[in-house]
Image: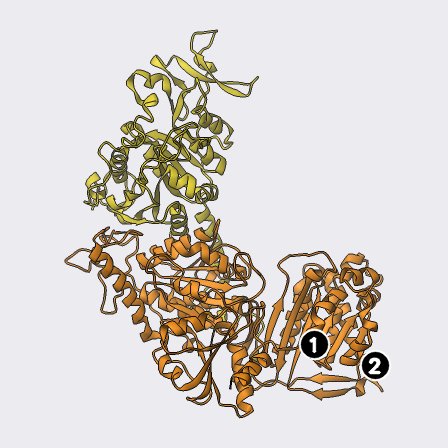
Chain colours: A orange, B yellow
Amino acid sequence: MSPQATKVQQVETVTIRFVGDSGDGMQLTGTEFTRANALAGNDLATFPDYPAEIRAPAGSLAGVSGYQVNFGSREIHTPGDAPDVLVAMNPAALKTNIADLRQGGMLIVNSGAFTDSNLEKAGYKTNPLEDAALKQNYKIFLVDMSKLTDSALEGSGLSSKETARCRNYFALGLMYWLYSRPMEQQLEAIKAKFGKKPQFVEANQKVFTAGYAFGETSELFFQRYLVPASTLTPGTYRNVTGNYATALGFATMAKLTGRQVFLGSYPITPATEILQEMSHFKEHGVVTYQAEDEIAGVGSAIGASFGGALGVTSTSGPGLALKTEMLGLAVIAELPLVVVNVQRGGPSTGMPTKTEQADLLMALFGRHGEAPLPVIAAQSPGDCFWAAMEAMRIAVKWMTPVILLTDGYLGNGSEPFRVPAASELPPLQVKYQTTPNHDGAYMPYKRDAKLIRPWAVPGTPGLEHRIGGLEKDSLTGMVSYDGMNHEKMILTRAQKIANVVEDVPDVEVFGAPSGELLLVSWGGTFGSVRGATEELRAQGKSVSHVHLRWLNPLPKNLAAVLKSFKKIMVPEVNGGQLAFYLRGMFPGVNPLQFNRINGKPIKIAELAGKVLEAL
Amino acid sequence: MSTTNGQTPSLPVYTKKDFESGIDPRWCPGCGDFSIINQVQKALPGVGVKREDIVFISGIGCSSRFPYYMNNYGMHTLHGRAPSFASGLKVSRPELMVWVVTGDGDALAIGGNHFIHAMRRNIDLKLLMFNNRIYGLTKGQVSPTSELGKKTKSTPHGSPDAPFNPPALAIGAGATFVARTIDVEGAHMGAVLKSAAEHRGSCFVEVYQNCPVFNDGAYTFLTDKAVKADAQLRMEHGKPLLFGKDNRKGIRFNPQTAELEVVTLGENGVTEKDILVHDAKREDPTLAFMLANLSLKPGFPSPIGVFRDVRRPTAEELTWEMIDAAKSKKGNVDVSKLLAGGDTWTIK
């Protein structure tokens, strides 16, 4: 069979997982392959899964890093339940991931890494590649990528360590061939990435080409695959991670309003990229400030908001815990602030690089005193853009801190993002009070009909005033220890946040508006739950789906929607926090729960199975 | 509006009264804080900044009620956290003059981290720390500046903890302006505040402040008429470090021991030439640090005045240089270009 004649099979979707040692460059391989599919017009979703340690001992089980991408010619909601293809760069990667590979799936292994020492580090007593069951269950392709990379770089003058670091490009080249992607764009990308070090441009291009050529000439693979472009809404697309999209949303707000967006932040996994990305948006009116700790991160943002900037702080769970006292101050001072919490596994340090949705109740209630604030959750990586803009619009309009919940899966995961036209962006005017508002004086707590207080900023003559954390008189803002004034202020602040409901869109029911079972989700589980709903509906089941973007205030029509179904099920990556909240907010509603808290997104098949049991 | 007194043309002529909010301070009778606010309100008309461009930010404690009594913009924030708010505000709006008012517990215990970072970043904050060596608002517990062995409500058997020496801490943390003054020395405090207002960069002013209720007489060893001349070392830039009655005593640097020592003019052939001349503008902080440490050494006077006053680019200046550079390099990018940055593809 000549290479040219290799059969090309068209497939609708495919899920590939790249796994290797932390030092093997799997995140790069994954993102580069994702880019190729994005440029080819596929819809896709990705899931990077890496250890908290930067470099766990080489070859160890703890050091395995993975990147999963699901791409297709139809709409893709999740990074895929079980990979169709597993690319394993060493024995530890095989051991920790083989159970996820679907029966009959393709297993591509760097056989050169299956040395006695690596097998021992992975805890294998015998070489698993010789295991009969493995051969029976999967289509195995043994490729000695170590040796093939070495020979591709023979005479290049690179050290053996440098050569080993090129190996991931061999795997990438092979996948390019296998999935019929054009090489040229990748050769360009390598040039752009390593431009400053020409010897690495040449080496990585060589190895990438060798990987591609290996597919073509080795006759190991009897067919290639092609995933045609999807039928996404027409437009210009780019691939974005959730953290990038969040940063882009804030920068866009700076651009649209002409006001400074001030980000005070402290590095924390998995939220750090928001700080990093925003530091590149200086020319758009973004100021970034890396604070000495989480508390100073939010403090600096509140200070900037007092000065008239649009204050933002970004963090993850442990950081939100540290910021809670500050949030109380922002509530009582009634200053605009957006707090982004990229949730991760808790409690305590928990699982920093793994995803979770267990900060919902902290976001809603985790402050001392009566301190309500709006809570919004993004539903996909690209949606983080829209959610960031919405959170900021609400914070400014209502003079309140807003918590935006994303999670590690959304923050690190990516998907195609349709670039909106300027006309699609929501308008926002940022206005400051510049004149006295009460008999020639300025009363900082004199509210409008919606109970919103004015925002007068330093530099405005005649409106000098003092605010702070002590309870204040309902008009003058002066310190007040009057008990009835305190109660009035508590009720007023609560009513103001309740009034935000005018900006909360009604929930839309996916599927029939009434029926047997309604799945209710929030945040990053959108894709899994929507995917399961589609599957179940295709089987003719009476299942609908409602996704909550707004957690406080809840949408006005939610109560009526919940009552239109015989059963409600709430799938969450936590112990049942939304279910608990709904029980409290809608007495009589008692949802079934599906809780999976393993650091990963919920699998569509597993959820669909639970729903079938419940029906 | 007036163009007199050398200030910017649009600057109104202010009097002390323009900086009084009209709310009567609620400090205990005899509290040192009264004299401090009095000096601050007296100093502000002379700093050349509009009233609406001045912001006072405080934390929690007796001292931190300060912003309520000033007729400027102000924020009374959280315990220990004032420098974080002030840093964000100043970086965001460098044209404002930002003062931080704090106490020894607020700045050095719960707020120690924010304090050292505000100092090392060299953000132009004017941080006034009222040091009464006690927790006043919680009624008399040991503070991070209380003396070793101090008996308080929380240390009935004496404090087992060594105290901070605040100016030494500020110098160590990288503050570019470090000074100390005393609540009862009004004229001295006024001069120090003026220098602080003129400085650009992180500014630390320790004010020895008497708490008449919980730590009365903490500074009489320094302020009593009978001992004052020998106990105070008044540092003035460019002048020899002389003290004592008739300025007969002085501070000499001993190169053999690499330490400062007290000498008396006319004794053992000591003349004024041997006396260390105070140089607050010295870039190297070592001498300032040695001077700061004298206040804890038995047999030495306590220095007051400006230890250190050096000019370096501030964090907000550098931040805005970078922002301006990015803006001039990339120009005014249209929002659609921002949104469509990076690799894109089109679906028709």
Chain designation of label 1:
A
Q: Name the residue under label 1.
A: A101
Answer above or below: position of B76 versus A321: above
- Please tell me which residue lies in front, A405 or A227: A405
Q: Which of marks 1 and 2 is nearer the N terminus?
A: 1
Quarter-of-image position of residue A59: bottom right
Q: Which residue is drawn at 33% across and 17% down?
A: B227
Q: Give the SS element for disc 1.
A: loop
Residue sitting nearer the eye, B164 or A172: B164
User: Horizontal and vertical percent for residue A484?
Assistant: 20, 57
Residue A268 in view here = yes
Residue A320 pos. (x, y %): 46, 58
Q: Is residue A305 left or right of residue A9?
A: left
Picture quarter containing residue A163?
bottom right
- Neighbour class for label 1 at 10 Å: few (<14), some, many (≥20)? many
| Residue type pointed to by label 2 | Glu
